[in-house]
Amino acid sequence: MLSSVERSQKIGAVDMADNKGIIINSDDKGSINISEDVVVIIAAAAAAETEGVHGLYASHNREITNMHIKKGISKVVKLHLDGNDITIDVNVVAEMGYSVNEIGEKVQKVVISAVEDTVGVAVKAVNVSICGIALKKKER
């Protein structure tokens, strides 16, 4: 599994100046705000790197590759904030030969771990939708 730094380098930086954020800490020294897009990208990268996941799936019927993740990220991963509760929806395409239930459980675990470890905020739930199945990726 890639570290959070390696994941962000692989996907690339996103301009998040105008996006809503999650306040992590606020005190007399200032506040720490993390864009919702940061959480979405962390979740997407973690899901994409999960064994048995062929790729991420956009709602407009196209698989999203890591190269194109910045453009279609909001169609692949949705973030829902309710107070301090974070729920994440992830759409994936499974690889043939893996149990789809196991893939879903693995995606839940890796997304929760990646977001909580990187951002330091608890994730209430990760809802995984297996939107398709594809042949295994060829070894390069």
Image (tube, rainbow, N blue to C red):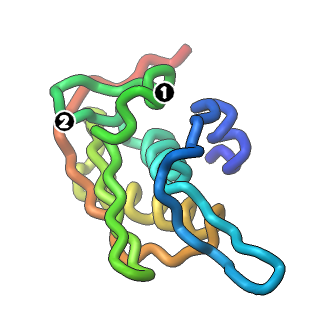
**Residue 94 vertical placement versus 88 (above, below):** above
**Could you say whether the residue bearing mark 2 is in a helix, strand or loop?**
loop
Question: What is the crowding at mark 1: few (fewer than 14 residues within 10 Å), some, or many (at least 20)?
Answer: some
Could you tell me residue 48's position as x and y percent? 45, 40
Which residue, as the protein is rendered here, is positioned at the far top?
Answer: 140
Could you tell me residue 49's position as x and y percent? 50, 41
Mark number, residue 66: 1
**Could you say whether the residue bearing mark 1 is in a helix, strand or loop?**
helix
In whole angstroms, how far apart are the C-alphas of marks 2 and 1?
16 Å
Mark number, residue 110: none
Asked whether 55 or 136 is in front, the reply is 55
Give the quarter of the image for residue 106.
bottom left
**Label 2 sits on residue:** 59
Could you tell me residue 133's position as x and y percent? 20, 33
Say whether residue 59 is left or right of residue 41. Answer: left
Q: Residue at x 35, y 30 (%)?
A: 72
